[in-house]
Image (tube, rainbow, N blue to C red):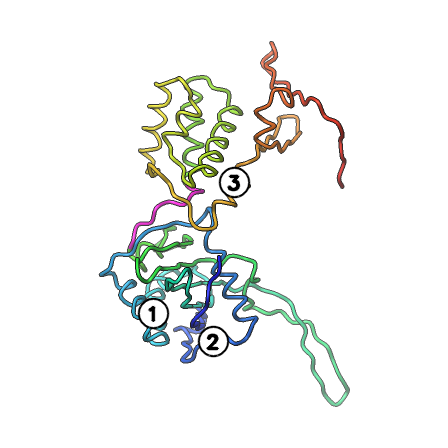
Amino acid sequence: MDIYLKKAILHIVDRSSGDPLISQQELDLSKEYVRDYLTRKILKISSPQTKTGVLAEDSRFAMIAKDTTDHFVANSEKLLQLWYDAYKESEEAPSCDILLALYEEDTEMYLALLKINYNQGYTHLVEADETGMKNELILHQALLSNKTQKADEAITVNLAKLNYELIEKKYVFSGEKQFYFSTKVIESVPVPSLEENVKVIKRAAEKIGSKFENPKHDLVADVKEAIYEQVEETGQINPKEVSQKVFKENISAQMAFEAEIAEKGVESSVSLVKEAKAITEKKYGKQKLKLSNGIELIVPLEVYRNPDLIEFVNQPDGTISVMIKNVDEVINRI
């Protein structure tokens, strides 16, 4: 995926010094390291943890965002203030930098708002006096995360369609941890992320499976396999198809499972964000098994489902034996 940066600006939010320090000039995008940092941060927003949704056209965030193409600097300040009015109500929310960027992707214009918390880090300081040169080790309190790391919170908005991708965190407001970005800043209820939906699906499968005496390791394996196959074939996760894959001919279990996940708010057809498909295929294409005796196994799905290569045997005493078969070579890596 290629994105083309048009404009960008950085505002500083130091909670110890009061109101944000507003920049009145754009970042210099002719500097390669600036372009590289912003581009990589924007690309990292799309992941299995990303929530999605569509802004209401008459929301304050949407109305300001749509006008950033013509009045970028002024509207970047308005968006910052809209965000900060909600953020500052949390005493524990940390200091950070806010980066806003206009960029083009597939001939469509997008706006990105990236929140990057400060990290501590060490660096050197060179001092000179009448006695000579002295190199000091100093602690820096306001370092930004590396370009390969995700922003702590972020949103990208398609300025024509107003659909968005969102990463948000919970902070304490009036003694209670809550999401503020979706509820107070963009005033939109996003679709749960792929990762959130998968957790609900897995827990529901285990809960219903225990009632129908399905072995837990088989249930988890079936859930992961169903997710992997659907992502590979359609780019979506459909809970009904997961139900049929996991509980097979057991109609009662399927109905109970579908009722359980519907109650938890899982979407009937969960679409993946732009970059999540490859990540999801990699993550759910393997079974990770931790045995009670301390042995851990990572088994590709095609191997897991092949009884000629691995077999789970239920012993009379209630234990399970895992048999690994037809291995030509064992490689011991340090």
Lateral position of residue 32 relative to residue 207, left or right? right
- Which is nearer the N-term, disc 1 or disc 2? 2
Boundaries of the magenta span:
188-196
Q: Is residue 11 visible?
A: no
- Amino acid type, mark 3: Glu
Please give the residue where the numbered disc 2 appears in the rendered image.
Answer: 27
Please give the residue where the numbered disc 1 appears in the rendered image.
Answer: 81
Disc 1 crowd, CA 10 A, few/some/many (<14, 14-19, 20+) = some
Q: Is residue 190 magenta?
A: yes
- Which is nearer the N-term, disc 3 or disc 2? 2
Asked which quadrant contains residue 201, the reply is top left
How far across and down, in percent of the image, does residue 104 sit? 41, 65
Question: Which residue is pictured at 29% across the width and 62% down the height?
Answer: 62
* Cα distance in 3D space between marks 1 and 2: 19 Å
Which secondary structure type mostly characterizes the magenta part of the structure? loop
Disc 2 crowd, CA 10 A, few/some/many (<14, 14-19, 20+) = some
Please give the residue where the numbered disc 3 appears in the rendered image.
Answer: 281
Q: Are marks 3 and 2 in contact (CB under 8 Å)?
A: no
Question: Is label 3 in a helix, a strand or a loop?
Answer: helix
Lateral position of residue 139 relative to residue 221, left or right? right
Could you tell me which quadrant the C terminus lies in?
top right
Q: Nearer the viewer, mark 1 or mark 2?
A: 2
- Amino acid type, mark 2: Leu
* Cα distance in 3D space between marks 3 and 1: 39 Å
- Which is nearer the N-term, disc 3 or disc 1? 1
How far across and down, in percent of the image, does residue 230 sit? 44, 35
Disc 3 crowd, CA 10 A, few/some/many (<14, 14-19, 20+) = some
* Cα distance in 3D space between marks 3 and 2: 37 Å
